[in-house]
Amino acid sequence: MTSALLEIEDLRIEYRKPGLLRRKEPFVAVDGVSLRLERGQTLGLVGESGSGKTTLARSVLCLVDPTAGRIEFDGTDVTGFRRAGIGGTTRRVPHWYRRRVQAIFQDPTASLNPSWSVRDIVAEPLRVHTDLRDDAVTRKVATLLDQVGLDPSLDHQRPAAFSGGQRQRIGIARALATEPDLIVCDEPVSALDVSTQSTIVNLLNQVQRDTGVAYLFIGHDLGLMRHMSDRLAVMYHGRLVEEGPAEDVYHRPADDYTRRLLDAAPGFDPAEQRRKRELRRPVAAG
């Protein structure tokens, strides 16, 4: 078996309240999680708010420092990478890692600079991480916009001129600019309406088929995640409670929390909706 693109081993992330009155015991956001993502595949990380899934994703992006455990990317231990290289034992995040690991964020409005044109937004990673300049950058931006279904002639406009779905397409084009091996997708469709969600999911699937990029896909909708993912991992209170092939987890969940997440999903039958509302209460309280 070839080595995985991303391996997470026994990862633990703790937070301590700053100041003199901080509590003695730290808050454990991620508690002993181990995961593996193969090249060109999608690992769906599912859980409710506060489950630790976004914290784990931010640690892969080197935006959160692990307390213990290991993160390995393409055979390189990246656990010690830090944004600013603070302290004598840390390693600054190298350009090659930023180039090969990109992100698509939940809110396309907040994640795009409102004062920049679309051309500048998509071109920025090209100018930072590649040797392309001037006309070559312009041509690459046009290619990327066309790839995500946007008219390249609109690249002079600012994000406010576009719909939510179009803004997310701009974010996807920006993430694809450096031809990454891995994209961390932090709930990239949850802020969009249902019909737009479908088009963005289809776009992401097509991009994966065309480029072979791997996704660490964060979400809470097991139905959507089942269609998007090769494997599903379910988190609850910082711990991994279930992980396996997407179809197995969805149709034959082994953990009671996973079953309750499935039961809590919205449906179309009023009686079924009432039953699921009752089931949602203990899930939310947990």
Image: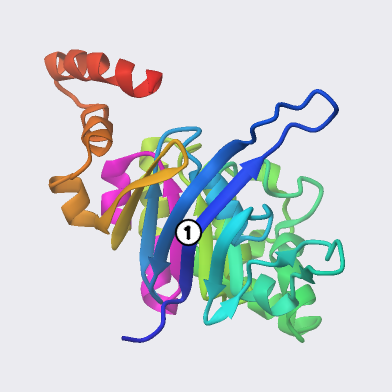
Indicate how the structure is coloured in the image. Answer: rainbow
Question: Which one is in front, 93 or 28?
Answer: 28
Does dot 1 land on a helix, a strand or a loop? strand
The residue that label 1 is drawn on is 10
Residue 255 occupies quadrant: top left
Where residue 172 appears, as percent x and y from the top left, is 55, 60
- Quick one: quadrant of the N terminus? bottom left
| Image quadrant assignment for residue 285 | top left
Residue 226 lies within the magenta run: yes
Relative to residue 98, is residue 286 drawn left or right? Answer: left
Picture layout, residue 101 above or below residue 165: below
For label 1, count other residues whose C-alpha is less than 10 Å away and answer few (under 14), some (14-19) or many (20+): some
Query: Relative to 259, does residue 174 appear above or below in the rendering?
Result: below
**Amino acid type of the residue that numbered disc 1 sits on in the rendered structure:** Asp
The stretch in magenta equals 204-228
Q: Residue at x 76, y 49 (%)?
A: 113
Q: Residue 241 placed where, x, y %? A: 32, 45
